[in-house]
Amino acid sequence: MEFMLDTANLEEIKKYEKIIPLAGVTSNPSIIKKEGKIDFFNHMKKIREVIGPEKSLHVQVVATDFAGMMADAQTILEKIDTNVFIKIPVNEEGLKAIKALKEKNIRVTATAIYTKFQAYLAIAAGADYIAPYFNRMENLNIDPREAIKEMTNQISLTNSKTKILAASFKNVGQVTAAFENGAQSATMGTDIIQQALAMPSIGKAVADFTSDWESIYDEGTKIADL
Ligand SMILES: O=C[C@H](O)COP(=O)(O)O
């Protein structure tokens, strides 16, 4: 199970890299927009510094034509590092770029996946990750649970190395459903993790433990004080 952060916010990445078993960081131009007009490559390099060389960094191309996507990919690899996963939307131009990048052994994350058909094409093209958009699929009355399960089946049937990196989450239930239907990875905003761990029931359990402890020992007594 790989938990990734779908953000380019350095403070959030610094904070949550210490809290969760972080596997990587993903972004797209809409996520970058939330940070304002950042110095793009320096910012991405800072994210790499924070997460280290072992975790995966997924950076999306901006061009919409094949030649432009290939040029974007080359620049990203030169100006950030050669381990970056190049995120490419699965449409005609994107699929062409995915095939070409895989022929050069470049790491690819196929993104903007709404249908099983897109996913199967990206798997067959050798994408390292495919990113189905869970919430956006639900909004279109496409069942992401069933789709992810079938993507998992096809990956297994074809002995493919592609991993499912589910994305576009609005709540914790969607994330757990993605994992339970076969996704190896899920990328999410820090709001989802915050919500999940700030449940009042968890807070109440911890408060009860503290109060029971302090009814036996003096207030503020630590285990190390005994
Ligand atoms: O990179 C893809 C995003 O995870 C899509 O998420 P969104 O539906 O919240 O924009």
Image: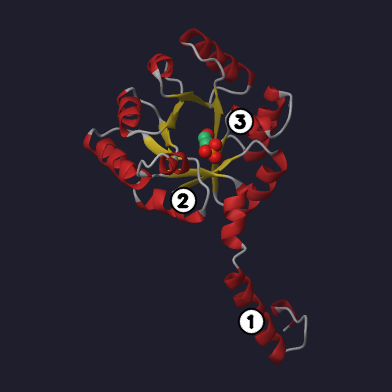
Whichever of labels 2 and 1 marks the residue nearer the N terminus, that label is 2
Q: Position of residue 98 (x, y in %)?
A: 41, 19
Identify residue for label 3. Answer: 30
Tag 1's secondary structure?
helix
Mark 3 residue element: helix
Dots 3, 1 in contact, CB < 8 A:
no
Inter-mark Cα distance, 3 to 2: 21 Å
Dot 2 surroundings within 10 Å: few (below 14), some, or many (20 or more)? many
Name the residue type under label 3: Ser
> Is the residue 187 above or below the residue 96 in the image?
below
Drawn side of residue 121 relative to residue 101, left or right: left
Q: Check disc 2 and give the amino acid type.
A: Val
Local crowd at mark 3 within 10 Å, few (<14), some, or many (≥20)?
A: few
Q: Left or right of 18: which side holds 182?
A: left
* Picture residue at 46% right of the left edge, 20% below the top: 106
In this rendering, which labeled residue sits more in front, label 2 or label 1? 2
* Residue 184 appears in the rendering: yes
Q: Residue at x 69, y 24 (%)?
A: 40
In this picture, is 33 found above or below 174?
Answer: above
Where is residue 70 drawn, in percent x and y?
50, 12
> Is the CB of mark 3 within 8 Å of ligand 1?
yes
Disc 1: which residue: 208
Mark number, residue 174? none
What is the x, y in percent for residue 74? 55, 14
Queried on whether the Cβ of the residue with tag 2 lies below 8 angstroms from ligand 1, the answer reads no
**Residue at x-position 65% and y-position 35%:** 8
